[in-house]
Amino acid sequence: MAEKIRDELSGMLGSLLGDSSFLEVDRRLKSPNIFSILRMQYRKSIYNSLLAYILNPHENHGLEDNFLRLFISKALQSSPLKKEVDMQLSPIPYEKVSESILDWDKLDILSADLRETMVVTDYPLGDEGRTVDLCIWNEPYSFAIYVENMVSARDSWKKYHGSGEKYAKSLANEYLLDLYKRWGDESGDMQYKILPVFLTNSGEKPGEVHLTRVLDYSWMIDELEPFLLFPTISSHAKMLLSDFVEHLKREQAEKLDPEFYSKLNYLTDIYGVVISRMHDHIMECNGCDTEEDLIIAYHDIYRRHSDTIDTLWLYSDSKTFPVVKQIRDEIDSLKHDEQMSVFQTPSTISASHQSWITLEGTDTHGKKVSSESFLAEVYFSASIGSCGIFVYQEPTRGMIDRIWMKAQEISEEMDIELYPRKVLSRNFHLVKKTYDTFNSLDIARDFIRFYRMLEEVFSEVLPGKSKTL
C-alpha cells in the first residue's frame, strides 16, 4: 500500500473514532438486545419460533388473536408475483387448486374470532420428510395457511453480487399439492381453504409465483409497536417484541428509521473508504503476522466495534459511485462473449456465464431439475476499490480443488497472479487487485482478463458447459 494512501486511511480512521455520530451509532448498536446478544439475527428457527409464539392465540403473551388476524389480513392483501394461469399442478389442475385458495374479505378477517386457531413450526407434509416453516390452521373457519420463512444474512459478498433478482429454492408446488390433498379432500365433510405465504427479509422471491402471497418483514414495525401498549400484553412478551422491533429497525433503517439512517449515511459518506478497506481485510484475514500500524488498528477497532463496522460497511456498499457507470461502459465495449451476463449495483459490477450459475440437480423423486447456484463470478467493488474473482464454496470439495488446480495452470500462461488461497466460510478469492486510484479503462481491462481466465478454467472443469476461447 502506498505511503500516501496509508496516511490518508490512518487519518480518516482517527477522525471516525472521534466523530460524535459514530459514538451515537455505536452506543445504539451496543445497547442490550436479545437478538444481537445471542447472535440470533439470522437463525431461521428463532424467527419461526418467535412468529409462532405471537401468532398463536393460546400462548401467554396477552395478544390473544389480534396479531394473528392482522397477519392474515396482510397476507391476503398482498398479491402473487404472477396472475396468468399458464401452469399445471399435476395431477391436480391449476384451476382446481386455485378454487381452494383462501379468499377472505379484510373486514371479515379483522372481525373474526380466531381464538381456536393452531400454530406450529416445522409442520410435516407428505411422507418424504418435507416440512412447512409455519402452519396455521383453524377448524371453525376451515382454513390452513403455510408460511415459508426466508431469513437471509446481510453480511455476505453475495449481498451485492449477482442480479438481485433471486428466487429462493422453494417446494411451494409440492406444498400446495400436499395441502390440497390434506385439507381439500372432496370426500371429507369439511372443505378447507389453503393459503401459501412467503415471508422474507431480503427481497428474495418464492419459487412458486402464481398462488403464493409475498410479505416483507418491514410491514411489522408500524403494526407491532401499538401492541407494546396493549393493556393485556405480558411483561416478557413486551420485552421480546420491543427487541424485535429494534432489531428490524436496525436491519432496514432506510425504510424504518430515517434519523438512524441519516447518521449512517453521514458516516459512510465521509469514512466509507476506510470502513470498506477495514471490513475487507478482516473478512479475509485468517490471522495477521504484521507490525504495520494500520493493520493492527483494523483488528483492534473491529474487535471493539464489530457490530457498528459491519453495519456501516453494508450502508457504505449501497452508496452510488459514478465511476461504476464509466467502468461498465468500458466493459461493454470490450465484451467478447454474448453469454457474459453483467450485473450492476450502485457500487459494484459483477459478471458470470450461464454455465457457471446453473447446475443440474435432482428432486426427491430422482427427476433432473435445474437449480441456480453461483459457482464463481468476476467483480469490481468501488467501495473497497478492488477487482477480482470469487469462487463460492457451495459445490463439492472436489469441484473447488479442480477449479484451483486449473487456475494455477492458466494463470501462468496469462501472467495473472493468483491471490493466496484463504478458505473462508462462504468463498475464497482466486484473483484480487486493489486500486489506489480508479482508471475506468484499466479496471475494465482487468475485469475482462479475469473473466477470460475464469471462462477458460470452466471450459476444462465443466467440459461442454463453457466454450474455450
Image (cartoon, helix red, strand yellow):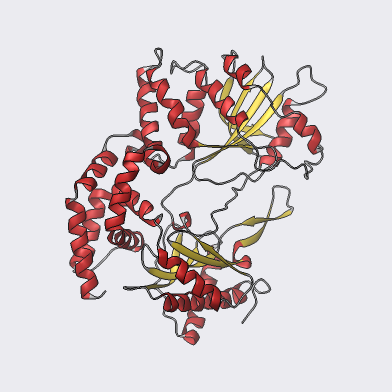
Above-or-below relation of 287 to 83: below
Q: Could you say which quadrant of the image residue 198 lies in?
A: top right
Residue 408 visible in this rendered orientation of the protein:
yes
Decide if residue 381 is in sight here.
no
In the picture, measured across the screen, residue 94 lies left or right of residue 354, that is right
The percent position of residue 439, horizontal first and vertical second, equals: 39, 76
Near-viewer residue (198 or 460): 198
Foreground residue, 401 or 445?
Answer: 445
For the point 37% across and 51% down, the residue is 315
Q: How many marks?
A: 0
Front residue (pair 187, 466): 466
The C terminus - image quarter: bottom right
Examine the image and state in which quarter residue 463 appears. Answer: bottom right
Q: In this view, does 14 lie above or below 434?
A: above
Q: Is residue 154 above or below residue 236?
A: below
- Which residue is at 47% across, 57% downward? 160
Percent of width and height locating residue 381: 41, 65
Q: In percent of the image, x 42 and y 74: which residue is there?
A: 440
State the image coordinates of residue 462 (x, y, percent, origin top left): 63, 71
